[in-house]
Image (spheres, grey):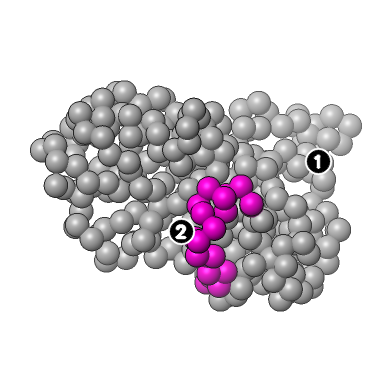
């Protein structure tokens, strides 16, 4: 039995997230089916995390055990032939038996992309309102407010360090039911070492890197930063929201399509 690590990129638009669900198209499901079609082995690849429906990945990592004696380059090439075009295997490699895509991860990086519809005008603007291209819309939040970047930058920086992020954790009874009443509650204390907002062309991009993330945590942070950017929340309220440890005091959940899992770090554990 050989332990495999795969790095994947996918467009999450047509998928009901990563995790296999009966009767629904998922990334884990199509990858498992492609592996079976290619090697004849039934495996369930374990991802570094369960991206939600509509969330994209530039560098998702999956691991699984397999008996087929196939060179890594041949496996990658064969899988990319049978996978849908929206999912690509970027790298396949044999790793140590103790490696696990989720349990071995030490840091993850996410990006969230925002199209500022009421920006400063320019090409494609109409009466002060910019038009979001159909080639951008599936991969960004088409946000209808003009946003104050400096305020968002300041509020984002306040999240760096080790904090209890309960205020940004999803309250998802359906997920709790799926995972069982006995499932341990995720530790809400996480360490964030990068939390920044910058302008990249026509987009505002929020980039966050940390030791781990709660369900919907990045999208809830972005929803709160947008509230700060449009003036509904003051910059100083970000500290109050963190301290409250209460989801009800934070901003709304940002739409899924703007979120990208950029990469996963493993240190020397591979």
Residue at mark 2 to residue at mark 1: CA–CA distance: 29 Å
Res. 144 mark: 1
In magenta, the rendered stretch is: 172-192
Residues 66 and 203: in front is 66
Q: Is 83 on the left-hand or right-hand side of 210?
A: left
- Mark 1 packing: few (<14 Cα in 10 Å), some, or many (20+)? some
Helix, strand or loop status at disc 1: loop
Residues 132 and 5: in front is 5
From the image, which quarter does the C terminus lie in? bottom left
Q: Which of the 4 image quarters holds residue 255?
A: top right
Percent x, y for residue 46?
35, 48
Q: Which residue corresponds to mark 2?
A: 108
Q: Is residue 181 above or below residue 25?
A: below
Residue 181: say if magenta: yes
Residues 180 and 47: in front is 180
- Mark 2 packing: few (<14 Cα in 10 Å), some, or many (20+)? many
Q: Is 227 on the left-hand or right-hand side of 21?
A: right
Q: Is residue 259 above or below residue 77?
A: below
Percent x, y for residue 182?
50, 61
Q: Residue furthest left?
A: 69
Residue found 57% across the figure and 53% down from its top: 176
Q: Is 109 on the left-hand or right-hand side of 270?
A: right
């Amino acid at each position: 039995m050989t332990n495999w690590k795969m790095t994947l990129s996918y467009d999450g638009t047509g998928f009901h997230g990563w995790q296999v669900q009966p009767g629904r198209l998922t990334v884990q499901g199509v990858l498992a089916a492609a592996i079976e079609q290619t090697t004849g082995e039934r495996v369930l690849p374990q991802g570094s995390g369960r991206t939600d429906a509509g969330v994209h990945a530039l560098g998702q990592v999956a691991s699984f055990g397999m008996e087929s004696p196939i060179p890594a380059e041949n496996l990658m090439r064969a899988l990319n032939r049978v996978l849908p075009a929206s999912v690509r295997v970027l790298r396949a490699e044999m790793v140590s038996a103790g490696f696990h895509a989720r349990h071995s991860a030490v840091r993850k990086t996410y990006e969230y992309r925002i199209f500022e519809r009421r920006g400063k005008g320019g090409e494609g603007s109409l009466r002060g309102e910019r038009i979001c291209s159909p080639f951008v819309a599936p991969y960004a939040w088409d946000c209808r407010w003009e946003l104050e970047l400096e305020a968002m930058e300041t509020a984002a920086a306040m999240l760096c360090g080790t904090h209890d992020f309960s205020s940004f954790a999803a309250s998802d009874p359906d997920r709790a039911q799926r995972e069982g009443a006995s499932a341990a509650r995720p530790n809400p204390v996480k360490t964030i070492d990068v939390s920044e907002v910058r302008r990249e062309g026509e987009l505002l991009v929020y980039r966050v890197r940390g030791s781990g993330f709660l369900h919907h945590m990045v999208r809830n942070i972005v929803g709160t930063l947008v509230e700060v950017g449009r003036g509904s929340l003051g910059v100083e309220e970000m500290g109050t929201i963190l301290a409250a440890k209460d989801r009800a005091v934070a901003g709304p959940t940002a739409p899924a399509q703007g979120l990208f899992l950029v990469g996963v770090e493993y240190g020397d554990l591979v």
